[in-house]
Amino acid sequence: MKYYLYNSLANNGITPELKEGIQPIDAVGLNYQEFFDGLAAEDEVVLIGGDGTLNYFINAVDTDKISNNVYLLGAGTGNDFFNDIERKAGEEVLINEYIKNLPTVYVNGLEKKFINGIGYGIDGYACEVADQIKAKTPNKEINYSAIVIKGILGKFDSHHATVTVDGVTNEYDDVWIAATMKGRYYGGGLKITPGQDRAKKTVSSVVYMSKSRIKGLMNFPKIPKGEHVALTQYVKIYEGSEITVSFKRPCALQIDGETVLNVTTYTVKA
């Protein structure tokens, strides 16, 4: 049997339209581990959603032990995972190979797997502000680019960062972003680590810095296409199995779009 699962709290509560005769199951409140433990060997599961759906799923069940076929039917507002594997929303894609041996982030007492990446700095700040807007006006469309622009121009301050990759430490001033990635994309289409390969057992960390706010803003539009990596004066990229990033002052961090507040340090183990 093939089960279709969706989140009724997402997509403004609209039930997804599927082929005639297919009735999706609302996964809100569903114990994923018990659900998978109760499946027959030949049963298959289709997750309907985007990056948020995947992030919730990989942290709700031991994906390394799943033997049933699991698919993602791309939907939702965030599809960085589909961008990375070069598939399109609306496709039903087998994802078993992508949900095993995932990296884990340790931050503020939390321990979470992630499918795309960790954003720390102006990207985490953008998610923090977006959450505040959603809390006040739930159905308002969020303009993340506008939040980032206003942040760089004055509402957000750059940080002094310490980045340790497999035991080797470097320090940087005027850091706007200190992300660590399993895939290449985050933030709704930003190609932040174009050289990262999710098939490898390592992650990539990117440091984006600029003493000048104006220069930092001018270089930012290069990120969606990955062109920022050529700006070696402003961008440093590392690859490793264990990465720790620390800021001298706390700020927000995002894990596949989920915000964690008041963070001074995080560690990722690939």
Image: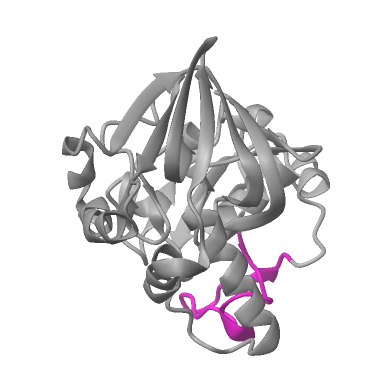
236 w.r.t. 58: above or below: above
Q: Quadrant of the C terminus?
A: top right
Q: Is residue 17 magenta?
A: yes
Please, which residue is most extreme toward the top here? 167
Please, which residue is most extreme toward the front here? 212
219 w.r.t. 23: above or below: above
Along the line of sight, which residue is nearer the eye, 193 or 92?
193
- Residue 4, percent across and down? 59, 63
255 w.r.t. 201: above or below: below
- In the picture, residue 74 is in which quadrant? bottom left
Q: Residue at x 46, y 32 (%)?
A: 97
- Residue 110, percent across and down? 77, 40
Q: Residue at x 51, y 26 (%)?
A: 163
User: Magenta residues?
Assistant: 4-27
Q: Is residue 167 magenta?
A: no
Along the line of sight, which residue is nearer the eye, 17 or 213?
213
- Residue 123, percent across and down? 48, 56
Q: Residue at x 50, y 50 (%)?
A: 71
Color scheme of the displayed model: one colour
Whether residue 196 is visible here, answered yes or no, is: no
Q: Main secondary structure of the magenta part?
A: loop
- In the picture, residue 181 is in which quadrant? top left
Callout count:
0
Q: Is residue 50 left or right of residue 66?
A: left
71 w.r.t. 97: above or below: below
- Residue 269, percent across and down? 60, 23
Q: Quadrant of the N terminus?
A: bottom right
Q: Is residue 187 left or right of residue 132?
A: left
Whether residue 250 is visible here, answered yes or no, is: yes
Q: Is residue 221 left or right of residue 126?
A: left
Q: Residue at x 64, y 86 (%)?
A: 138
- In the picture, residue 90 is in which quadrant? bottom left
